[in-house]
Image: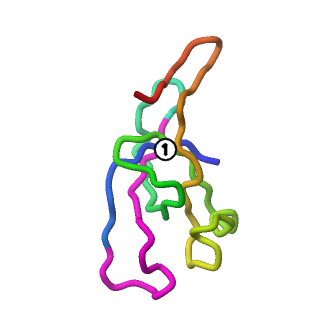
Amino acid sequence: MILAKVIGTVVATQKAQKMEGIKLLLLEKIDPVTMKGKNDFVVSMDSVGAGIGEIVFYVSGSGARFTNVTEGKPTDSAIIAIVDFIEKDGKYTYQKD
């Protein structure tokens, strides 16, 4: 699993039929301690209802096709969780509002 922040939405009106109705989100990988972006981006299928500004876990490769939303779909990236908090060494580096 990879930690990232949802920074945008991607709209594609022409796409494979199996992708119809699936939300595509633009993610930026982040450092879990500083919560700063790593300037490394990916477009991911949303399987959990994530929104702009949320911190999420996504998976890549064949694991991305194991959610109810992405099963049998042409993807190698899927958001699988929305993060509530991150704790390191007894201190929270992130807490969802």
Q: Foreground: 8 or 34? A: 8
Whole-percent x and y of residue 61? 65, 65
Give the quarter of the image for residue 16. Answer: bottom left
Which quarter of the image is occupied by the C terminus? Answer: top left
Whole-percent x and y of residue 41? 43, 53
Mark 1: amino acid: Ala
Estimate how packed mark 1 is, as few (under 14), some (14 to 19) or many (20 or more) residues with alpha carbons within 10 Å.
Answer: many
Whole-percent x and y of residue 95? 48, 25
Question: Above or below — where is 95 with respect to 21?
Answer: above
Q: How many marks?
A: 1
Instruction: Write the start and end of the magenta stretch as one range.
Output: 12-30
Residue furthest top as drawn: 90
26 falls in the magenta region: yes
Q: How is the image coloured?
A: rainbow
Q: Residue at x 31, y 70 (%)?
A: 11
Q: Is residue 10 left or right of residue 55?
A: left
4 falls in the magenta region: no
Q: Residue at x 64, y 48 (%)?
A: 1
Residue hosting label 1? 4
Q: Foreground: 17 or 33? A: 17
Q: Is residue 13 left or right of residue 89?
A: left
Which secondary structure lies at badge 1? strand
Whole-percent x and y of residue 38? 44, 40
Q: Is residue 52 left or right of residue 18?
A: left
Q: Residue at x 59, y 53 (%)?
A: 80
Q: Residue at x 51, y 21 (%)?
A: 93
